Image: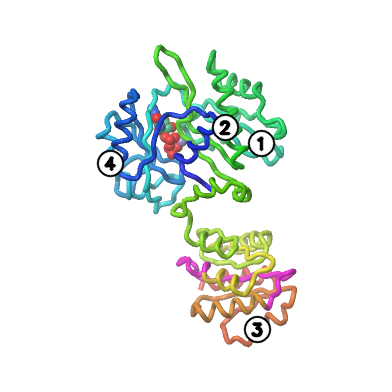
Amino acid sequence: MNIHEFQARQLLARYGVALPAGEVCDSAGAAQQAAAKLLAQGCHGLAIKAQIHAGGRGKGTFRSGFQGGVKLCRTAGEVFDNARAMLGQALVTKQTGPEGRLVSKVLVTAAPVIKRELYGAVLLDRAASRPVVMASAEGGVDIEEVAARHPKKIIREAVDPSAGLMPFQGRKLAVALELKGDLIAAGAKMFGGLYKTWRECDASLVEINPLCVIAGPEGKESLMAVDAKITLDDNALYRHPELQAMRDLAEESPLEIEAGRHNLNYIKLDGNIACLVNGAGLAMATMDIIQHFGGEPANFLDVGGGASREQVAAAFKIILSDPHVKAILVNIFGGIMDCNIIAAGIVEAVKETGLQLPLIVRLEGNNAAAGQQTLAQSGVAIITAEGMADAARKVVKAVEK
Ligand code: GDP
Ligand code: MN
């Protein structure tokens, strides 16, 4: 589950990570007030930032034509004008797709003078089976690009999960980033805080880009997290009701939310061949074989090992509510799953939705014969297939027609 920048900041602050002061607002008036308050506290610059679950906001463009989801301002009036231009509008960035994301909140922060933009992150290194702290002196830019072009510019420090990030490791990272003097201790504290946030919140990713060296009064420098992204591990959310409450359904695909309500694992994709499969491995293999024969899957859908007739019918309706779908492939290998339950669910859903699209079904395994019979007797137009290759070929051909 992703959360917003303003929510990530709340969690980071809890674990001692230094951040510019700020406030989240849902109206231009509130943004102006927050700005006035920050100015009264003595900050000399302000930033206003659109809150959406996507990065690249700084370089993004609103569908209204307004440029930039991150703006630096001098006055509360400027913050008001920018808030009015952002709120209620869709922001398109490299990560949102062309339809963009509706902005319903903005974050107003003090904008410190930035001397250097660094990068810091904590994630799980699956190859090493350890948490890893990643840092780079090349912050503020697309880190994937840095990783691809200059992999040596990314520093990694693996963490022993039973000990946590040791202070010497934090200092080592700080020195590798060429921090000097007091900033070495500040860097160690920053990385310690990032690791602690990751660990305590059961996050899968904590990412600060940019992590900034800030110019303070009398030339005294400090470190601050100027942007914040946190992804939480869905499998651990049950342990954190207060984090669960941070979920923003407006940021999630309505079809995926509906699937979640029926305990179905559904992920929408860009193709036109819908798939309904039991088991995640078989679902992935089905998407692969569709592509092998020149088709494009419209979704990943795993109905699980013991789906009920109602779940199958719900799954069918979900895949059909994607307007791009031109044909459907049902691929079931019944182990625990009774093929006849799948067949009954399909018939129910086809009748209820008045399906007109080609429907290709491959049923194999537990009670397959009964399932085939249910389908044959239903009067529903179904193209049956023998094995996966045959099913994939048939569905690709049906779409080409
Ligand atoms: P993103 O584009 O979604 O990653 O949003 P960021 O919060 O990272 O903002 C994009 C860029 O705007 C940053 O890399 C900074 O260069 C700049 N920026 C953001 N906040 C501030 C700030 O408080 N002060 C200054 N000087 N620049 C900022
Ligand atoms: Mn950023």
Q: On the image, numbered disc 2 is attached to which residue?
A: 194
Ligand 2 neighbours mark 1 (CB distance < 8 Å): no
Q: Which residues are magenta?
A: 318-340
Cα separation between marks 4 and 2: 33 Å
Disc number lying in front (3 or 1): 1
Residue 62 in picture, x, y percent from top left: 34, 46
Q: Which residue is mark 1?
A: 131
* Quarter where residue 334 is shown: bottom right
**Rendered position, 314 above or below 125:** below
x then y, percent, for residue 127? 70, 40
Residue 92 painted magenta: no
Residue situated in front as seen by the camera: 323 or 76: 76
At label 2, which amino acid type do we have? Leu
Residue at image x 57%, y 73%? 313
Circles 4 and 1: CB distance less than 8 Å?
no
How much space separates mark 2 and mark 3, taking CA atoms? Answer: 56 Å
CA–CA distance between discs 4 and 3? Answer: 62 Å
Type of amino acid at the residue the image marks with label 4:
Gly
Give the labeled residue for mark 3.
374
The amino acid on which the numbered mark 1 sits, given as a three-letter code, is: Pro
Query: From the viewer's perspective, is the residue at label 4 or at label 1 nearer?
Result: 4
Residue annotated with mark 4: 29
Label 1: few (<14), some or many (≥20) within 10 Å? many
- First along the sequence among labels 4 and 2: 4
Quarter residue 186 falls in: top right
Relative to 217, residue 270 above or below: below
Residue drawn where x is 47% and y is 20% of the image: 222
48, 143: nearer the viewer: 48
